[in-house]
Amino acid sequence: MTLDMSQFHDAFFEESFEALDTMEAALLKLDVGAPDPELVNTIFRVAHSIKGGSATFGFSHIASFTHSLETLLDALRANRMTGTTAISDLLLKSVDVMREMLRAVQAAKPIDAQRVADLQFDLELAIAQKTEVESGAVSAAGGSSIEPTVRAWRIWFRPYQQFFARGNDPLRMFRELEGLGAVEVSAELGALPSLTELDPQSCHCAWTITLRGSATEEAIREVFDWATGDCDLSVEHEPSGGIEDDAPVPATPASRGEPRAVGTPPALAKVDAPNVSGIGDAGSIRVSVEKIDELMNTVGELVITQAMLSQLGRGLEGPAADEFRTGLAQLERNMRELQESVMRVRMLPISFVFSRFPRMVRDLAQRLGKQIELKITGEYTELDKTVLEKIGDPLLHLVRNSIDHGIEKVEARLAAGKTAAGTVHLDACHRGGNIAVEVSDDGGGLDKERILAKARDRGLVDAADALSDEQIYDLIFVPGFSTAEQTTDVSGRGVGMDVVRRNIKELGGKIEVRTEQGRGSRFIITLPLTLAIVDGQSVAVGTETYIVPLTSIIESMQLKQAHVSRLGGRGEVFAFRGDYLPVIRLHEVFGIEPRARELHEGLVVVVEGDGRRVGLFVDDLLGQQQVVIKSLESNYGHVEGVSGATILGDGSVALILDVPGLIRVTSLRTAA
């Protein structure tokens, strides 16, 4: 029976991409000239792990490339090569290429062989140049009179059959041993099968190695470090400095009285093979996103069923009815706990998004000739995976703009009395039922006079219009608006900030701008924790029921006729806390027959969206409840003013209102 290795592909790709993120983060922390050995080991482990997995699954191009990368990293790890900025850039490019290769193989697309070959040549060239330098250093030191202490070691090395398939190479290990001293290698071929039964992908040999030199046992074992789990290894020291080939092997407590194969030495260092199944340690398990989504959908259906039972229970009478309602109350509590538990499973730290920015900031700063320090806080703040997937692009635009437009050149910063290096700060935190993500910088800030002048030149603002600071800064979100003097491939084409606002609005969030000229800018994004379930207020309009998200509601009231006025161009307005708010009649928006037409006969729900407040005119308030959001777009397309639908306890469908969208659509109608 042949094992189908393709069943492990998804786990391999997922783990490899995570490992590459770790490798990139370690490279960005690496101090050129004095690299931290632990960081170098981390980078080496990633390369070796991906090489072994690629070889196991037959991805030969990836295995070949990572072998060259591993050789260079091994030289860095053993201090046989000095870390430089050029080497650091080469390693970061290698991460990009490995990521591209993995994505291509995952999608069953061809690999860019030329790009891979070019970079692999650069890796091999760097290794060769290091070797030449080493050879010269050895020749120059030939007249040294210092004699190192000579030790003699016997190494017994028996790889397992899968040794080659894991990407290991015994010849490379022997070459590394030669760098530690004089080496004699004797092969043991007793387990070698006949030629007709020989599998060239399996290892059947074992080796006895004699090493004489000044190496320590730790240095010898380090050579075989990455074969741990794929071999048996014994390292023994002879204090006399001489080893006889037929010297008896001393018994150890671990081997006394235990049968073993002829020629097999005792006290072998055997470690469990690495896990390739996708299952982590005993405290965790890898679960696909699809299964979590299915679980969340089932919980949503249970919430709907529980609401139906609750509505049914209201009409029951008698002793059994009380017990039924008590059971329903317990069911509701359990459902709330189950829902919160599933929501926690869907929650992921925002570090999954933040982790992409250190590399981008480094590369962009180099291209623009700026010194920039990236500060990240709140990276362990969690939010729903759906929100997490969609917040990446808006943050990317904001960070790029901060680097390009916000942070000044070094000369300008020094002239302004600032430090040479500017700071871009990414922060995330929970605020009530929402999450706030902030992108800030200590650059020049927004120039409101320049923004206003540009808007007037384009006809966006009349010369006589007096705008507040907030309205002026809001102009940067107009499609195509830009104050850049020249366009670049970084920014300045007027594409980006309008996309930022649109994407954030689609997530049910909002963005605020706070800036001080000469001191910097802050862009604050407020997002809901989840897009799956929302706490809402049910309102009645005619025979229909609508859901207004509780996070949008400020207050509900019944107006008196004297409080309502009509203003030209704004329609009906009412006084509210020192301001006049427009009224949106929901029955007119959705074209239905209301029970109440006069404002004093119904209720007004004051809501806020995009920083604007309005009053929604409804017939009545029905109650608050949790509702499961069902998308309309897959079947009906986007409906302005509606974010989705839900199923009520009586089985009917209610639309969930998108307050910002509702304000926009009614503003356009009023303007027309």
Image (cartoon, rainbow, N blue to C red):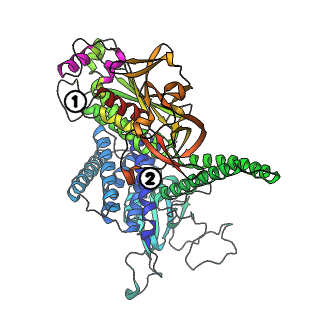
Give the residue number, with chain letter if any, for mark 2.
45
Q: Residue at x 70, y 47 (%)?
A: 314
Where residue 33 sits, quadrant-wise, is top left
**Residue sticking out furthest to the right:** 319
Secondary structure of the residue carrying tag 1 is loop
Q: Position of residue 95 (x, y in %)?
A: 34, 49
Q: Position of residue 245 (x, y in %)?
A: 50, 72
Q: What residue type is labelled 2?
A: Arg
Of tags 2 and 1, the one toward the viewer is: 1
Work out how far the residue at label 2 is from the one at label 1, CA to CA, in angstroms.
41 Å
Mark earlier in primary sequence (2, 1):
2
Q: Can residue 242 be seen in this view?
A: no
Q: Nearer the viewer, residue 209 or 87?
A: 87
Give the residue number, with chain letter if any, for mark 1.
492
Side of 380 where 624 appears, left or right: right
Label 1 Cα neighbours within 10 Å, binned few <14 / some 14-19 / many ≥20: some
Q: Which of 586 and 283 is in front in this view?
A: 586
Q: What residue type is labelled 1?
A: Gly
| Magenta part of the chain | 449-474
Q: Is residue 353 above or below residue 515?
A: below
Q: Is residue 453 magenta?
A: yes
Q: Is residue 636 above or below residue 509?
A: below
What number is the disc on residue 449?
none
